[in-house]
Amino acid sequence: MRARRERPLSALSGRRPGPPRRDQGQRRVVAIAGVVMAAFLVLVGQLWYLQVLEGGRFLDASDKNRIRVRPIAAPRGILFDRRGVPLVDNRPAFTLSLIPRELPREPVSRDAVLGRVASLLGLPFQELLDAVARVQPESLFPVRVRRGLTLEDVAKIEEWKLELPGVIAEVEPQRVYPASRFAAHLLGYVREASEEQLRSGRYRRGDIVGQSGLERLLDQYLRGKDGGERIEVDAMGRPVRLVQQTEPRAGAQVVTTVDRRIQEAAERAMDGRAGAVVVMDPRNGDVLAMVSTPAFEIDRFTGTIDRAAWLRIVQDPSFPLLNRAVQSQYAPGSVFKIVVAAAGLQEGTLTPADRVNCTGEFRLGNMTFRNWREDGGSVDLYRAIAESCNIFFYQAGLRIGGATMARYARAFGFGAPTGIDLGGEKPGLVPQPRRGRRNPWPAGETVNMSIGQGALLVTPMQVARFMSAVANGGVLWRPRLVQRVERPGQGVVWSDAGEVNGHVALAPVVWAFLRQALWGVVNDGGTGGGARIPGLDVAGKTGTAQTVAKSKASLGQDHAWFAGFAPGKDPEVVVVVLVERGGTGGQVAAPIARKILNAIFLERVARAGFPG
């Protein structure tokens, strides 16, 4: 039997034989290798992106995780008086600050930290929340929350430091003053930059900025250049080492025209009264002292003041924020009689020999104008000024005319700002003729203006400049507050040489008569005897300005004026005193001026053998 050949299985199935199994394995290897290679390329690309393209950004972010940037506030410049005595200085003070970047990210944890701070220091929790909400959460710059911390407050922060991430107590320079209300309106106050000031782009959040007075006027010079530190900290926010430091540069030094000794004497003399005092050098317009009372507590504004305290100050009926020396306007009363006398003598409508019977009242049509005293006799112009006889000046005003009195008032600087470098100065008011009327200057208004009443309004600073012109022979100086500004290493960077912005042209004999009459007011039985100082020639004029009563309590309380200068023959200082609703100028304002002049010339009077 022949053996039968076996046929391959593939032949039986009708399929052709395929490639070897090892070819399929190779394909799998190649596919896997391709996937691995692609993954490797993606990984390399990602590493290149992170290291090359974004390396700087991530390195910076890494540094921020361990580097704390702490600004160092520059001390504000010092304000000195004319003798080099500080009017305001700086001292170190503690400030509570929050670093948004280091606070917990979760709202619950963050609120727990802020709640702990509020509990430890007795602060409103909402105040802390608002402070953090004002800045970006990634900010590394401290957000200052509360200035003026006590040592006890700082000890509490340090004791709980590990549980208070992002909470620090910084040391910053803070303004310090000789007294709580010392020269408050003159110096002004500083506070953290407001939202409006921040929008100007000149300040950063937390910057201390001058808000009023000289602090605001000279802020660009007083503000120094802040420094800073880069500090490496650990995971708990504790400092490890100082990486970099830039020292702050202090603000410039300012030499003012103020005499601290005179300023303090004027404030003591006005203690307990509402009003203003201006002391000026008539030879150059230097403001030696400027007082407005009541004043605000200037040191309260340097720290954090809550809304309730701010509202109490703003709504105080005594208006402590108002600078009465330049921002309040008053009827000048009998002080204006010097302007009337000057106009009459210069225009020839009055002579020193003119006489009037100074009786108790003066009738004009159906109106009655009264004298300040019932009795009186025949007085000439000298005695009318010395005794402040209203009857004489009623008649003089009608002879001179309203237009002429108004013209001389403007010549003496009334009705326009003095130009002093303080914000909010009022211009006063000199009556204008009534247009479209047959008589543009009604007789009743003319009579009122002749004794400094009616529509006529002035500021104490204007009266000081006016009396300075009488003392120096007609020169109207712009009131000067700052002599120069100096920077260490640079010398004088700004100075004010003074400026004459007006001149009153009167005959020398008129000036001489006016000064002699003002001497008589104080030393020859006049209304200003309360300002008399043995051993010192004081000249001046009292004034009692009637007020419009706003309530029964204020009925009949007139403003008291005294404006004078000393020594009489060679004037060195002008002193103007206004006491709101104080009574008569001779009884109230003149004695205050005497106290101030006594303090100024104490040594000279003592050398003359008269006690102060």
Image: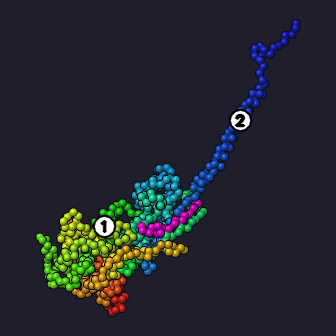
Residue at image position (57%, 66%) is 246
**Mark 2 lies on residue:** 34
Q: Is residue 527 above or below residue 54?
A: below
Indicate the position of residue 610 as horizontal and vertical percent values: 32, 91
Q: Work out whether residue 223 can be spotted.
A: yes
The magenta stretch spans residue 478: no
Residue at image position (58%, 58%) is 67
In the foreground, 49 or 127 = 49
Q: Residue furthest bottom?
A: 609
* Between discs 1 and 2, the one toward the N terminus: 2
Q: Are marks 1 and 2 in contact (CB under 8 Å)?
A: no
Indicate the position of residue 487 as horizontal and vertical percent values: 51, 73
Q: In the rendered view, does 168 fall on the left or right side of 420?
A: right
The residue carrying pointer 1 sits among few (fewer than 14), some (14 to 19) or many (20 or more) residues within 10 Å by Cα, namely some
The residue carrying pointer 2 sits among few (fewer than 14), some (14 to 19) or many (20 or more) residues within 10 Å by Cα, namely few
Amino acid type at image mark 2: Gly
In the foreground, 274 or 413 = 413
In the foreground, 144 or 211 = 211
Q: Is residue 23 above or below residue 608?
A: above
Indicate the position of residue 73 as horizontal and vertical percent values: 50, 66
How was this image coloured? Answer: rainbow
| Disc number lying in front (1 or 2) | 1
Find the magenta span and give its range. Answer: 215-234
Q: The C terminus appears in which quarter of the rendering?
A: bottom left
Amino acid type at image mark 1: Phe
Residue at image position (75%, 27%) is 24
Indicate the position of residue 94 as horizontal and vertical percent values: 47, 66
Q: In the rendered view, does 89 fall on the left or right side of 388?
A: right
**Mark 1 lies on residue:** 319
